[in-house]
Amino acid sequence: MSEAESIGITADVLVIGFGKGGKDLAGTMGREGKRVVMVEQSDQMYGGTCINIGCVPTKALVHHADVRRPGDDRQSWYQDAIGAVTDLTTMMRGKNFQMLDTLDTVTVVTGKASFLDSTTVEVAAGDDRLTISAGTIVINTGSVPVIPDIRGLLKSEYMATSTDLLHTKELPRHLAVIGGGYLGLEFAAMYRQFGSEVSVLEAYPKFVGREDDDVAEVVVDILRDQGITLITDAKVTEVRDGSADTTIYYEVDGRPQTLTADKILVATGRAPAIEGLGLDRAGIRTTERGAIEVDEHLRTSRPHIYAIGDVNGGPQFTYISHDDYRIVADRLLGDGTRSTADRRAVPHTMFITPPFSTVGLTETAARERGYNVRIASKLVAQTIATHRARIMGDTRGLIKFVIDADTDFILGAALISIDSQEVINLVAFAMRHDFPASELGNSIYSHPSTTEGFNELLGTVARVRLPSSTAELENA
């Protein structure tokens, strides 16, 4: 930084933000011989949210929590898990930096970027200033946690974001989670497995509210059976700290309630990270929700400036950021035909145990759209071909397919089961390529595997008589 502080840099491509889409694009363009500058505001975020504070560390902690045995000391196990995850992210961060730093055509600059005009960005690092001009600019700054306007919350010494918890070595005695979305429920399940008492406060009338009632009921039952307290219709009004814990004041149907905890996780969503970018100076428009406005090719209101990943207001998933990279790379190096309109059947997974994965339409949404719907659904414990789940010792869950009865195409699926985070990708692939449900049902799968359940739910060949007793089922 200091060597270039007074001269400025001119590049073919400037990428602001070291996240998944940005780093892949920088590497690709650099290997194509383009002069690339990657700007990242923190040396602790090389590689982006996913490997540092998102997918990798949180799912690693889920694994460490799941393998804790009843006799293992909670605090020491948790502390060791945090240490192991820190080592993992440190290693991956270094490898991500090296991936770009070893390319002669790519320069990594650490500092805070702000537009001076539509082609020039100033990067600040302490008192140093560096100007970078580029013909193509890609904004990949991600998102930041939203802290709701609740009296006393922001100033509470017990309040934490998910990022904060990843660096907290003391296991909470009682973790209160404000927000019952994917992030909130994943952390709730994880910390309960580590041994914390956990309560989740959800403002809406039901958890997993976008799913069908039968699917949501199975998810909620799993979490409640784990010992998590789930509270719906909870309007949090105040947080008041004490000497050793904090009291959360909330209302349910207008009735005042309180909850005492020694840690509060705020899991009420994330907002695009645009503060300080100086977008107005570049003439870049934003949406009403504060995201950078883009077209189907991820171009902003300035066609030479792109916005990829969380900052453009799309689905906040690493694999969406990676697909954003492919769209922009196709604009810069290919025929430019790839777009967000090509996306079909994007899968999602909530990493509770067992994981909960979905793709496509729910039954409710499919019926509302006028489809002639056929449902193939079964509890995992009642499915014959669930040897994998029995081997793993966890037969909780549900497998549900929503099928267009007129075409036999899969409209959507919800899988709550061992390995669902992998299996859902096969379902999504079938949906994207219009494979009939019966094609999945009559395929040959390895044994024992979770996909064998498709034979039972979706197959069209004649089946043997179903077991009529538990003994028969266990011997199947």
Image (cartoon, helix red, strand yellow):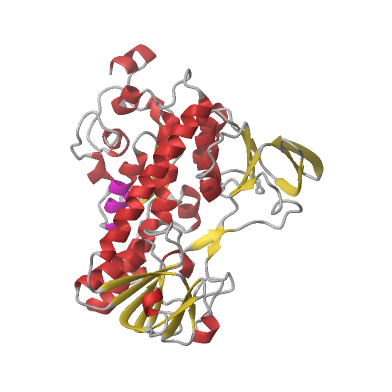
Q: Up-down: is 461 above or below 25?
A: above
For the N terminus, which image quadrant?
bottom left
Residue 147: image quadrant is bottom right
User: Horizontal and vertical percent for residue 155?
Assistant: 71, 53
User: What range of the chain is rendered magenta?
Assistant: 425-432
Q: Which residue is drawn at the image coordinates 40% and 75% (left, top)?
A: 2
- Which residue is at 38% across, 61% downward? 320
Residue 426 can be seen, yes or no: yes
- Image label count: 0
Taking 177 as reference, is 445 left or right?
Answer: left
- Is residue 302 left or right of 200 when viewed as pictured? left
In this rendering, is residue 298 above or below 216? below
User: Which residue is located at x 57 percent, y 47 percent?
Assistant: 209
Is 88 located above or below residue 94 in the figure? Answer: above
Magenta span includes 221 = no
| Residue 436, position as x, y percentages in the image | 26, 50
Instruction: Tell which of 301 and 239 is nearer to you.
Output: 239
Q: Position of residue 31 (x, y in %)?
A: 20, 71
208 relative to 176 in the view: left or right? left
In the image: residue 102, left or right of residue 363: left
Q: Is residue 336 visible?
A: no
Q: Is residue 120 above or below residue 84?
A: below
As drawn, the residue found furthest toward the front would be 3
Picture coordinates of residue 201 (x, y %)? Answer: 66, 42
User: Split into 4 quadrants, where in the image is the C terminus?
Assistant: top left
Q: Residue furthest right?
A: 255
Task: Please identify the dominant SS of the magenta region.
Answer: helix
Q: Quadrant of residue 456?
A: top left
Residue at the extreme top: 471
Residue sitting nearer the eye, 391 or 75: 75
